[in-house]
Amino acid sequence: MTEANEMIDVRPGWHIDPDTLVPVLDDEAGFRQAHADDPAVEVLIELWSGQPGRAAELLEPLVSDDPTWRLRALAADVIGARGNPAAAITVLEQLVEQHRYQPPEGILAQHLGLAHYAAAAFPAAASWFRRALDLSTEPGADSALAGSGQFLDRALERVPETISHTRAWSWGVAFLYDPVHGDVVDVDPDVPVTTTPTGLDVMVRHAQEYDWANGQEGPAVTTMHIARPDKDTTPHRAVVVEATLETPTRSLSIGDAEGQILVPVPAAHTRVVISHGDAEWCSPDQVWIDLYAGT
């Protein structure tokens, strides 16, 4: 992990604030000179000087003339800085999907991680920084991806010890595994949880299970309550499974093909205790996942 006051990225004329991960200008004239060939240099200066409204005005004609992925990503940054992080995240999600398995994917994933970080969605930010870090070793990777590991550390440091993660699960199953060394396990639909040393899956409420009797509209959702308790205690709920996962990166991915979050874990082996409010596991909409240091 990086120290809280350590500079993450220092470049000619600017650096990244180690707490907010926002670029900060140190030498405007030097920055302008170093980026004289960049048509968006004035946009960056205004944005990084805390003037997103002016940055938007300067950027609009550039995007209209040449809507490259880079300028569209910059537009998302401006949108987020103007107080609409949800819209910025939506734009960047679309850009990542459009450039999947293409050279820009890594830097777009980093932008998306920064947008989630700015919105204080640290588990989602960590997941995208992990993706950017994984792509940083690809041939032709953008040099800016070199900071993704430190961004990842920052995001994981800020994940609360207890979080609640609510979303619709279109496949009715969530996968838990180390993001580098783990595996997506084969699902056994006859059991609530399938486990292996390198991954496990949890059967949850399927998104199509509408609860019309209660007037619910839209996809059904499941809330996962994820905690790293200080003490090794047994939950006051029905324990469905207890398993130990290999987590060499000291992090755990929780998600499916439609999205993941990343949370820190206390050790290279993690004891996972999954519990439920009822003794019978039947399409639960509430799942508790407690994470302990394993042996």
Image (cartoon, rainbow, N blue to C red):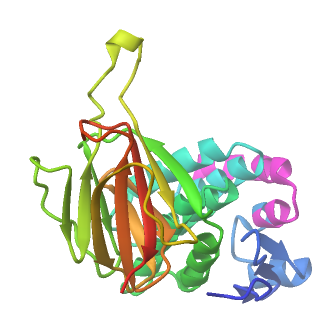
Give the residues drawn in magenta, as a range.
44-66
Q: For residue 11, what is the image quadrant?
A: bottom right
Going by the image, does 202 lie left or right of 274? left
Magenta run includes residue 64: yes
Image vertical order of residue 256 relative to residue 252, above or below: above
In this figure, what is the number of numbered marks?
A: 0
Q: Please name the residue shown 70% across and 66% down the image.
A: 39
Magenta run includes residue 11: no
Q: For residue 6, what is the image quadrant?
A: bottom right
Quadrant of the drawing holding the C terminus: bottom left
Of residues 53 and 80, the one drawn nearer to the viewer in this rendering: 80
Residue 219, percent across and down?
Answer: 36, 28
Kindly tell me whether residue 144 is visible in this rendering: no
Going by the image, does 194 lie left or right of 151? left
Q: Please name the residue shown 41% across and 18% down the image.
A: 217
**Is the magenta region chiefly helix, strand or loop?**
helix
Going by the image, does 56 lie left or right of 97? right
Going by the image, does 227 lie left or right of 200? right
Residue 18, percent across and down?
Answer: 75, 78
Q: Please name the residue shown 48% across and 75% down the image.
A: 265
Residue 68, percent across and down?
Answer: 52, 58
Q: Please name the residue shown 62% across and 64% down the image.
A: 114
Kindly tell me whether residue 218 is visible in this rendering: yes
Image vertical order of residue 32 relative to residue 206, above or below: below
Q: For residue 1, what is the image quadrant?
A: bottom right
Residue 53, percent across and down?
Answer: 83, 47
